[in-house]
Image (cartoon, grey):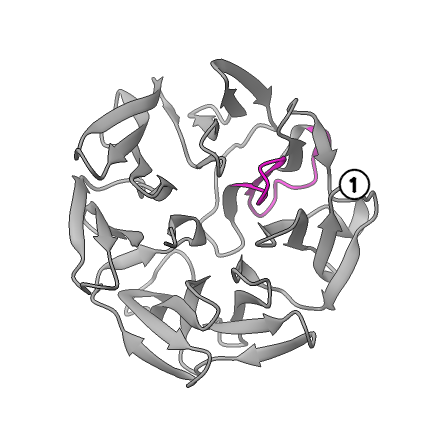
Amino acid sequence: MLVTASTTSGNEIFLYDSASSAPQQLVSLGAGQPPDARFISSQKLAYVDATNQASTRIMSFDLSTRASTAEVSVTGNSNIPAFAYSHDGSSLAYLVHDSSGKASLHVRRGGHETTLNLNAIPGRGVGRDDELRLEYAPDDKYLLMVDTFVGNQAQAPQTGQFLVLRAADNTVAFLPPSGVSANATMATWAAHSDRLYYRDAIGVRTWDAGVTSVGTLATGLHWYDPAASADDHWLAFADIDARSAPHVRLYDLQTNHVVPTVTAARSHPILITADTLWYLEEQPCQSECLGGPFQTSGKVLAYSLTTKSETALPFTDVHSLSQLSVFRR
C-alpha cells in the first residue's frame, strides 16, 4: 500500500493499493503547506494539517476506523515543516519554525518531550538545493535531521541544520566535518544498516554509526532526493543537467556505477521494490517558476529496472513524492 499527496489548489491524501489500481481519497485539505503524509504502521498514517491559520497539527488517520486524531499542535505563527515517527512507533520527532526565524527540533518518547534549539532561519529558499528531512535509522537508534538551504550552512554545526542524534538520549552522534562538508545536505539512510549517505562539496559521502571518519562513495556526484532500495543494492537519485533539467539515475552499490533510467526529465524517485521505481514527470515551465526552468507536471510514473520501461500510474496531480510515504506488505 502506498500513500501520496496531491498539491496544486488543494491537498489530498490518497491510498493506493496495487491490487486494485484505484486510488482512494482519505483526506482533503485546503491549499497551503503539503501534508507530508506517511505510514506509522500498516493501519495508520500521519500527516501535517496547516489549513488553520491559528495552529499547525500533526494528525494521525486510522485506516480501519477512518478516525483522525491530533497528535501535536503548535499555535501562533509557527509551523511544522517536517516530522518522523520511529519504525516501532514509540518516538515522534518534528521540526518547528516560527515567523521570526527561530527553529527547534522536538522529540517525544515515552510521554517525555525534548526540545533542541537550532540555528535561526531568516527565511527559506525555494531552489532544489533546499532540503528538509527527518528520518530514523532502520533500527531506530539514530535520528537524522536535515534542515538546510542555500546560505545558511556556515553557522555553528552543533546547533544546526545537519545532525544525527542518538535516539536513546538525544545527544549528537555525528556532525559532518567542517570544511568541505560544511554544506552537507541531501542525506538518507541505508535500508538495513546504520549507514548514512549524504552530499557535500566533494560528492556523495558515507558515515557508519560508531565511526568518527567519513568515506567517499562517489566524487563529484551532486545528487538530489536520494532513496535506498529495500535490498540495499541501489540508491535512486535525481541529477541536474546543463539545461537545469532533472533526470533520475541509479547508483549500483555492488559495482559502484551510475545507471541511467529514461532520458526524459524526471524527479523525486522512490524505490518501491527491488525492481520498481516511482518518480515524477517534469516539464519546462511555461512562465517563470520558483524552483528553476523545470517543474513537476503532476504525473507519477513507474519504471522497471528489469525491462527499462516506464508506465503511467493513476495520479495526475502529485507534486511531492517521498520515500517515507511507503508501506510494504
Horizontal side of 329 relative to 216 (left or right) equals: left
Image position, residue 93 (x, y; %): 49, 29
- Residue pointed to by mark 1: 210
- Image coordinates for residue 285, horizontal then vertical, percent: 32, 68
In-front residue for pair 40/132: 40
Please name the residue shown 32% across and 71% down the image. 301
Residue lying at the far top in this picture: please name it.
112
Q: Position of residue 199 (x, y in %)?
A: 66, 56
Relative to 238, residue 73 above or below: above
Residue visible at 69% across and 34% down in the picture: 155
Which is more toward the observer, 22 or 219? 22
Instruction: Give the farthest residue toward the front.
Output: 329
Is residue 109 rendered magenta in the image? no
Magenta region includes residue 144: yes
Secondary element type, mark 1: loop
Count of all numbered marks drawn on residues in the image: 1
Q: Is residue 65 visible?
A: yes
Position of residue 154 relative to residue 232, above or below, is: above
As drawn, 120 above or below 229: above
Decide if residue 201 is on the left or right side of residue 237.
Answer: right
Quarter holding the N terminus is: bottom left
Crowding at dot 1, Cα within 10 Å, few <14 / some 14-19 / many 20+, comes out as few
* Magenta-tinted stretch: 135-158
Measured from the top left, where is residue 283 in percent x and y? 33, 72
